Image (cartoon, rainbow, N blue to C red):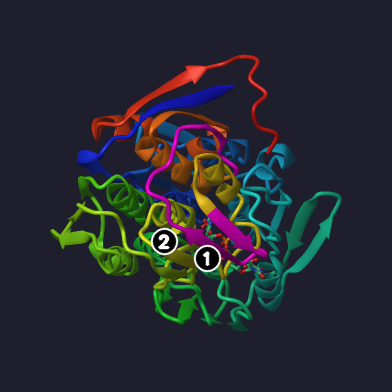
């Protein structure tokens, strides 16, 4: 098992370039199944979730050519199979998009019950409700989800919960449906807009992505022969913004969309940091101990749950007592036990709230990434802690961050990836 050995403390300084968004990429890849042709995707993050998705598409009949680490061509003219491999699809959450895409393309789909980070209950009732409203029959049994339909027909669907996955999945299923589909109470995250932009570039007619109401006018087919560039990753950018603040550093974060980072910028300014909007980059600096804060995670444009653990690291060393309320996931405070091993004083109050009594500094320790964003947060914690941190369970981090240790090293972090064949540190 690999681990990261981090020697701290370091004030992170310099430039970092943000990769394409993981959560957009893992929706755009299955969306290519709706095209009967060839398309090129650029700015694709080279992360393990993307590589797994490409392998799944190949098992379904897609032909994929890699031009570079971040650029591929996908030929989806010969999709012959509607059964995605159960072992691969049950490994990560975003495999649920194969349901919407294969239903749209072939009228049938079968995938393993989606896995992904253990953040508590992760129901997909809203996805199923959407498919059924479009006319599909959906069965969940024996570790898999199957869906079938003779003809998808556009309709109005009200989402009982604001769900990123359900919004995108219903969008995928309705692009080739007959008539108009309306999604009310849709999620508005940047990657929803990006998936809609991708589909529209290929000939879809989707309006209103990024607002509460999305209208999809069904079209007969989507064309290929187009190149699309994935939007920059809002969460990776936010991770480096918060790393600059936690380390009292100064980082120029390039290739990002400052507007997507508004709520993070607002919190950083509130706790005493500086954020400069430079158009396609932001510069974040901090020259003192952060102020305490109250943070509540919310769907976009609220504070993202995927930056909650990284914000938790900042507040663990803030001046005073802070509170984080997690309103999306039930089990997103697992990282606090790891951070407490590093000298933090965090008291979870049931599943949804934690109180952070700021300490002056953290100390290096042996810690485990309990999920993807927890891993990124603990990496930041390791760079600001006094002494050596050993961070285990890197497979979580590798799912969503491209070249993460190299990017941190370029900012001055002393960090090495080390192989330890018999390591049994973590049981998460
Ligand atoms: C996506 C992101 C994930 C992020 C989350 C919230 C991807 C691949 N993952 O996950 O990184 O943390 O958005 O921003 O894009 N819910 C239901 N029924 C459903 C669907 C969701 O009750 O059918 C609930 C969930 O339990 C959760 C909330 O809705 O409490 C939001 O979930 P959702 O937005 O669907 O998250 P994901 O799309 O799975």
**Within the image, what quadrant is residue 346 found in?**
bottom right
Query: Which disc number belongs to residue 168?
Result: 1
Identify which residue, 141 or 227, lies in the foreground: 141
Residue 163 placement, left or right of 262: right
What range of the chain is rendered magenta?
346-370
* Residue 261 percent coordinates (x, y): 31, 63
| The N terminus - image quarter | top right
Residue 394 placement, left or right of 385: right
Residue in the picture at 44% in, 22% down: 417
* Residue 264 percent coordinates (x, y): 33, 64
State whether residue 112 is above or below residue 63: below
Residue in the picture at 61% in, 14% down: 421
* Residue 218 percent coordinates (x, y): 50, 74
Crowd class of label 1 (few under 14; some 14 to 19; many from 20; radius 10 Å): many
Residue 71 visible from this viewpoint: no
Task: Say which residue label 2 marks.
Answer: 191
Q: Nearer the viewer, mark 1 or mark 2?
A: 2
Query: Which disc number belongs to residue 423?
Result: none
Disc 1 CB within 8 Å of nearest ligand 1 atom = yes
Residue in the picture at 40% in, 63% down: 320
Judging from the image, what secondary structure is the residue with disc 2 in?
helix
Residue in the picture at 78% in, 51% down: 144
**Within the image, what quadrant is residue 272 found in?**
bottom left
Residue 89 visible from this viewpoint: yes
Disc 2 CB within 8 Å of nearest ligand 1 atom = yes
Residue 251 placement, left or right of 95: left
Identify which residue, 298 or 148, lies in the foreground: 298
Judging from the image, what secondary structure is the residue with disc 1 in?
helix
| The C terminus - image quarter | top right
First along the sequence among labels 1 and 2: 1
Identify which residue, 190 or 292, lies in the foreground: 292
| Residue at far right of view | 142
């Amino acid at each position: 098992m690999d681990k990261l050995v981090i020697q701290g403390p370091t004030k992170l300084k310099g430039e970092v370039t943000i990769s394409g968004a993981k959560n957009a990429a893992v929706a755009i890849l299955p969306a290519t199944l709706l095209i009967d042709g060839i398309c090129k995707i650029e700015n694709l993050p080279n992360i393990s979730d993307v590589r797994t998705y490409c392998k799944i598409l190949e098992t379904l009949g897609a032909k994929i050519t890699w031009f570079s680490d971040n650029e591929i061509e996908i030929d989806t003219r010969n999709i012959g199979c509607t059964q995605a491999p159960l072992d691969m699809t049950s490994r990560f959450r975003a495999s649920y998009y194969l349901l919407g895409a294969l239903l749209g393309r072939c009228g049938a789909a079968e995938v393993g019950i989606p896995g992904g980070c253990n953040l508590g209950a992760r129901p997909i009732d809203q996805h199923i409700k959407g498919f059924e409203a479009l006319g599909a029959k959906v069965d969940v049994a024996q570790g898999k989800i199957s869906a079938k339909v003779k003809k998808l027909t556009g309709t109005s669907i009200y989402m009982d919960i604001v769900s990123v996955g359900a919004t995108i999945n219903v969008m995928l299923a309705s692009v080739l449906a007959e008539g108009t589909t309306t999604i009310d109470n849709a999620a508005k995250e940047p990657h929803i807009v990006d998936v809609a932009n991708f589909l529209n570039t290929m000939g879809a007619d989707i309006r209103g992505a990024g607002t509460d109401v999305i209208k999809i006018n069904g079209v007969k087919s989507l064309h290929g022969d187009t190149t699309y560039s994935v939007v920059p990753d809002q969460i990776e950018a936010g991770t480096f913004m918060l790393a600059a603040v936690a380390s009292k550093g100064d980082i120029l974060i390039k290739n990002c969309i400052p507007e997507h980072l508004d709520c993070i910028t607002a919190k950083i300014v509130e706790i005493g940091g500086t954020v400069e909007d430079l158009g396609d980059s932001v510069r974040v600096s901090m020259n003192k101990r952060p102020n305490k804060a109250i943070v509540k995670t919310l769907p976009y444009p609220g504070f993202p749950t995927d930056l909650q653990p990284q914000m938790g690291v900042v507040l663990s060393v803030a001046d005073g007592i802070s509170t984080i309320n997690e309103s999306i996931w039930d089990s997103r405070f697992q990282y606090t036990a790891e951070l407490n091993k590093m000298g933090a004083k965090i008291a979870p109050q049931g599943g949804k709230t934690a109180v952070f009594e700021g300490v002056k500094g953290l100390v290096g320790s042996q810690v485990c990434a309990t999920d993807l964003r927890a891993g990124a947060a603990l990496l930041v914690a390791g760079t600001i802690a006094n002494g050596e941190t050993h961070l285990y369970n890197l497979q979580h981090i590798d799912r969503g961050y491209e070249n993460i240790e190299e990017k941190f090293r370029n900012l001055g972090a002393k960090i090495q990836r080390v192989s330890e064949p018999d390591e049994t540190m973590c049981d998460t």
